[in-house]
Amino acid sequence: MRVAYVSMDPGIPVFGTKGASIHVQAMLRAFLAMGADVTLISPRIAGDAVLPVRTVALPMAEGCRTTALLAANDTLAATLAAEGPFDLIYERHALYAHAAMDHAAAFGIPSVLEINAPLIEEQSRHRSLSHPDEAARTTRASLQAAGAVVAVSPAVADYARAHGAARVAVIPNAIDADRQALPHVPGPFTVGFLGSLRPWHDIGVLLDAMALLQARMPAHLLIIGDGPDRDRLAPRLTAIGAEVTGMVPHADLPRHLARLDVGVAPFSATQPFYFSPLKLFDYMGAALPIVASRVGDMEALLDHGRLGLTVPPDDPAALADALDRLAGDAALRDTLGRAARAHVMAHHTWDRVAAQVLDLAGLRVPA
């Protein structure tokens, strides 16, 4: 089975360490595990990860980024024709990209479009959206042409349908099936945050909660990641003695997670929530208890308290109380962590995601 994996977002180094990069690599590994012959097509073949896939680096025109992205559709169409034939074209949705799904529809090739966020709204809110009419047109074209659409959350599925997608399945993110939960590293009670320091992560509330918790007991905050808000938050991070690792290779995550007693997923109610946070599945895979903000479908993801605790968003006192509760109850930490790991390994592995993708595409999973 020949699979074309297309990622047209130049902001994603496909072999890098950011969350989107890890997602790309996870799906590549899952397709490879099924015996697929995978060709990865992207304008940014960058990063240190090594995977046995054929890579095709698409050239990007100089000048205006949006104009270059629109022009890249013609290059992508020609590349798919030259590299084919393919049994499946799988694309990670990107702004202004439509050629992969158009090509699949024109030649009767099964296709699946993965959509991780309402990109038009996200780009408008957090950056700037150039050529909004073209963004809307190409988004609609791609979603309408796709044989099937995989959305990572119900909110993203609603966005896809609003832009013309006819056949949408909600498949949350996942974890590698062979992920090991390493033995816990003894130390002070350690709260961990895995992810990027960006506006949609309510890091300010987490820091306030840690200050409240430290007034009651010794506690340490470990941030596994980095991001544009780090400099702004630096004085507050220093004030509570937080440790920030910076970006770490995905293969090193288990040893960092082994230092944690609890994993947190803080999100603000002031920001739209449409995510399927990779951190949740990483915490679960490490058998960690979780405390998350009660936003979006977070309660459902944590099975209404069976896999972790939820607290009101934007409420440092409530977050501190939940952390305090877990700090004082090792049995509860163990119960939640064990249940979370059993759940994620049974229901949310990348191999299962890839199998669902092939089923949506009407293809048989290789024996």
Image: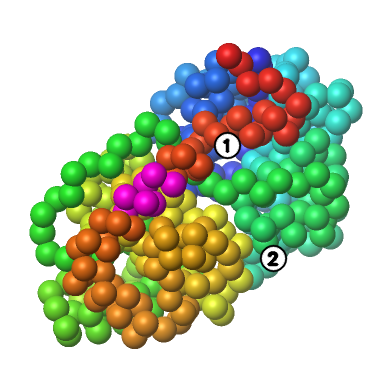
Mark 2 or mark 1: name the one nearer the start of the chain: 2
Residue 148: x percent and y percent?
Answer: 77, 39
Q: Residue 342 in magenta?
A: yes
Q: Residue 285 in magenta?
A: no
- Asked if one can make out residue 336 in the rendered structure from this viewpoint, the answer is yes
Look at the picture and state if 236 lies above or below 141: below
Residue 239: x percent and y percent?
Answer: 20, 79
Question: Where, by quadrant of the figure, is residue 327 drawn?
Answer: bottom left
Give the amino acid type for the residue marked by disc 1 in the picture: Val
Q: How is the image coloured?
A: rainbow
Give the amino acid type for the residue marked by disc 2 in the picture: Glu
Residue 130: x percent and y percent?
Answer: 73, 61
- Residue 234, numbered circle: none
- Residue 121, numbered circle: 2
Quadrant in which the N terminus is drawn: top right
Q: Residue at x 63, y 55 (%)?
A: 153
Q: Residues within 10 Å of mark 1 (few under 14, many from 20)?
A: many
Look at the picture and state if 93 lies above or below 306: above
Q: Is residue 79 left or right of residue 313?
A: right
Q: Nearer the viewer, mark 2 or mark 1?
A: 1
- Asked if one can make out residue 72 in the rendered structure from this viewpoint, the answer is no
Spatial separation of the CA atoms under disc 2 and disc 1: 26 Å
Look at the picture and state if 206 lies above or below 78: below
Please provide the residue range marked out in magenta. Answer: 337-343
Quadrant in which the C terminus is drawn: top right
Residue indicated by mark 1? 353
Q: Residues within 10 Å of mark 2 (few under 14, many from 20)?
A: some
Q: Residue at x 69, y 65 (%)?
A: 121
Q: Residue at x 54, y 78 (%)?
A: 269
